[in-house]
């Protein structure tokens, strides 16, 4: 079976949490079929450690839920702010239909790769596969319909979570993204990003 890694980030909601120009990253989780790695601490350490870990893992597929529009460009922006070099490559794709505004400071959504890993935005895959009566495509709503339990918190107060609660929450979301992709792998894998040959200059300050 193809190696796959669910990725999720949590950001500082004391500053809104949705603008990478002002809100730092508080935690990143990488979920595999065998467990979850949670990275917390100073933002520079988070960015360095997630990049190092992805550089060491067997090449596979990074699975996100709306990573094309949020997690991955957010990581790229925060790395550039600190002058850090990542193995993340982003290329804007105007063909991705917008159902919500792009990340502040960005013109749209992205295709991605990270070192030897391809990227699958499971949200985009589920959206493309959805029937008219599918209902909400929010991560936890889709997970509930699949019988998967999720950790729930007040998303406006992520910055007030205890370290343990933050870890549980980010791990849950990374694990759910991976589990939902795995649940329909034969279908969702068809929506893998084509690896961009050249990173988009608007977000490629990391290289």
Image (spheres, rainbow, N blue to C red):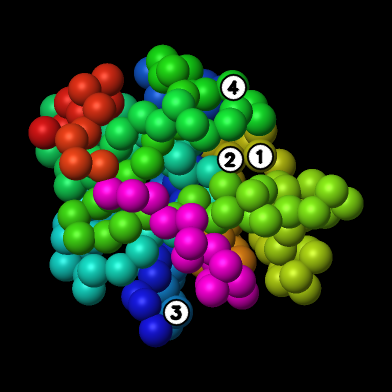
- Badge 1: how crowded within 10 Å, few (<14), some, or many (20+)? few
Between 145 and 40, which is closer to the camera in this rendering?
145
- At a point 18% along the width and 35% down the height, the residue shown is 198
User: Is residue 109 rendered to the left or right of residue 58?
Assistant: right
Tell me: residue 140, above or below residue 42: below
Image coordinates for residue 201, horizontal then vertical, percent: 21, 22
Q: Which mark is residue 103?
A: none
Residue identifier under label 1: 155
- Badge 3: how crowded within 10 Å, few (<14), some, or many (20+)? few
Residue identifier under label 4: 101
Q: Are marks 4 and 1 in contact (CB under 8 Å)?
A: no
Q: Are marks 1 and 2 in contact (CB under 8 Å)?
A: yes
What residue range appears in magenta?
181-195
- At a point 33% along the width and 49% down the height, the residue shown is 194
Residue identifier under label 3: 33
Looking at the image, is mark 2 or mark 4 nearer the viewer?
4
Looking at the image, is mark 4 or mark 3 nearer the viewer?
4
The number of callouts visible is: 4
Q: Are marks 2 and 4 in contact (CB under 8 Å)?
A: no
**Magenta stretch holds residue 187:** yes
Q: Dot 1 lies on which element?
A: helix
């Amino acid at each position: 079976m193809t190696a796959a890694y669910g990725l999720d980030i949590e950001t500082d909601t004391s500053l809104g949490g949705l603008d990478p120009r002002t809100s730092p990253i508080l935690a990143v989780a990488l979920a595999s079929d065998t467990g979850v790695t949670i990275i917390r601490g100073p933002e520079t350490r988070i960015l360095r450690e997630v990049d190092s870990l992805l550089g060491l893992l067997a090449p596979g597929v990074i699975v996100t839920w709306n990573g094309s529009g949020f997690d991955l460009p957010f990581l790229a922006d925060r790395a550039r702010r600190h002058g850090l070099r990542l193995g993340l490559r982003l290329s804007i794709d105007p063909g991705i239909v917008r159902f919500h505004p792009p990340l502040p400071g960005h013109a749209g959504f992205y295709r991605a790769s990270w070192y030897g890993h391809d990227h699958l935005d499971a949200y985009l895959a589920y959206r493309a596969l959805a029937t008219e009566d599918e209902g909400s495509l929010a991560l936890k709503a889709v997970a509930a319909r699949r019988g998967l339990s999720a950790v729930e918190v007040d998303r406006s107060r992520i910055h007030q979570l205890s370290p343990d609660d933050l870890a549980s929450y980010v791990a849950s979301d990374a694990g759910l993204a991976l589990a939902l992709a795995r649940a329909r792998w034969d279908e969702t894998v068809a929506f893998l990003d084509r690896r961009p040959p050249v990173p988009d200059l608007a977000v490629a300050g990391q290289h």
